Amino acid sequence: MMRIVATTALFAAAVAADCTDDGGNWYCNQVNAITYKNVFNLGGPALSYNKVTSMDPSNGACANTPTGYSGSLSPLDEEVSLHFRGPLTLKQFGYYVPASGNSRRSTNDRPHGHGHAHAHLHHAREPAPVVEERQLGAPVTATIDGVVVSWLNDWSGQPTAAPAAAAPASSVGYAAAPAAAAPPASAPAANSGAASSSGSSSSSASNPSILSGWTRKAYYNAESGTSEGLVFLNHYGGAGSGVFDTSFGNSLSYASADGHTGASSPQVLADTTLASSDEIVIMSDQKCSGNNGDCGYYRDGTVAYHGFGGSNKAFFFEFGMPSDGQTTADPYKPVNMPAIWMLNAQIPRTLQYGPAQCSCWTTGCGEFDIFEVLAPGDARCKSTLHSNVKGGSSDYFPRPFTGTIQAVLIMTDNDMHVEILQNKENFGADLAKALVSDIVDTVGSIFNLS
């Protein structure tokens, strides 16, 4: 496909021909790679978020304080956690940093040998966010836990009704519930920051941080049962590990081998398929030093580990997203809507699902949805950023219903590159600089947020 400039009539014509509004979510072109450029530019609003400093289980109150940040990749250069929601099979996971050394906040450079449901961005005990629907590229405003946030990309957190019949081999249509606003007769407004591209992003040429080999710091292989440098957690505090109270519910816990409940000690995730209601959290295997210590605040008794830090980092995945046949949407329990996403690690350590003041999420400490299915049984995976800059590409990845695919997220400077790998790679102890350069320069879709 030729390079398309977002502000031209050519782009508008392409949007009209290729993009559809499906239950409030815009889908344009199926792609194998998306590059987010200038994601963390410093010309936006005040660069701070509210960091949780205390949680009182006697009354459910949380205190927080504004925390500033700056620099490359901020605030996602801070420690992050990786999250996996079923139905999903995770076969391999690898975390890498440049061999020359990660530039900041790397915690993983030293050697070392009540159930709940969610609608991903929604909190379990509160109704789904009210999202004001807009045309493609127009401003979107959402009230989430009483906090108004805005971004430029069309995205709706509202669940859609089930399709009449699942069609895994191709994209499927859904009736919206409630119905999305009707699109205008003309093409939807083009996002001034988005452009589809058939040319190289040339990231490697302008980014010296990736012009070296990369070293693996954490690895998981389901078939061999290998787990190095990481720990598997979930949200079943009080069931074998972690804590539970009536104000804040479950803390993080060690995950059982099948991912379906808690455990009393670290377990290696089995070679299994996570159910729709299951969420696994991967962090490094470095324990936090104590409440209000090197990991910030978390409840006493919480299973607390460091995340994956640094301003240059890469995550490799091998996974599948099979259908479990469920088709009924539920705002509190996503069904047949698998997802892989990243959070600022403070969020799950304090309270991932609960009152807004008990999490830094609503004030922009960082989330990136890497592969997320937005409707039960849908065959498309979207990506969306929720941070100091908010937005997401309306292009989409195909959902891997059968077998597995390999994919990579490479984060460097102000860019993030997500790609489905066309050739199987060995998630070895080291990555050649040529491989990393080839990946970030892959022809794909460019979403420019500057």
Image (cartoon, rainbow, N blue to C red):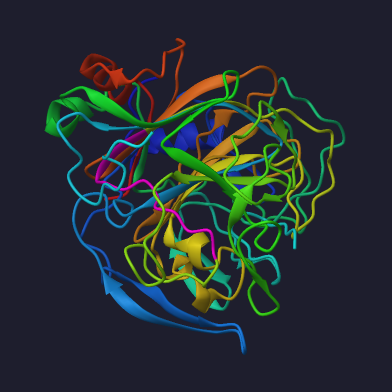
Residue under the image location 33 percent in, 26 percent down? 3
Q: Is residue 173 magenta?
A: no
Asked whether residue 42 is in view, the answer is yes
Residue at 39% in and 48% down:
286
Q: Is residue 409 above or below residue 375?
A: above
With 140 as the anchor, is 436 left or right in this view?
Answer: left
Q: Decide which of 343, 191 is in the foreground and name it.
A: 343
Q: Main secondary structure of the magenta part?
A: loop
**Outermost residue to the top:** 423
Q: Is residue 368 left or right of residue 79?
A: right
Name the spot of residue 339 as percent of width and height, x first: 60, 41
State the image quarter where residue 28 is shown: top right
Residue 315: name its quadrant: top left
- Percent position of residue 64, x then y: 40, 80
Is residue 411 shown to the viewer in this render?
no
Bounds of the magenta segment: 302-314
The residue positioned 70% from the left and 46% from the top of the image is: 278
Q: Give x and y (percent) for residue 101.
A: 17, 36
Report if residue 307 lies within the magenta region: yes
Q: Is residue 255 left or right of residue 149?
A: right
Q: Quadrant of the N terminus?
A: top left
Residue drawn at point x = 28 percent, y = 69 percent: 45
Q: Position of residue 253 (x, y in %)?
A: 60, 55
Which residue is at the front of the view, 258 or 79? 258
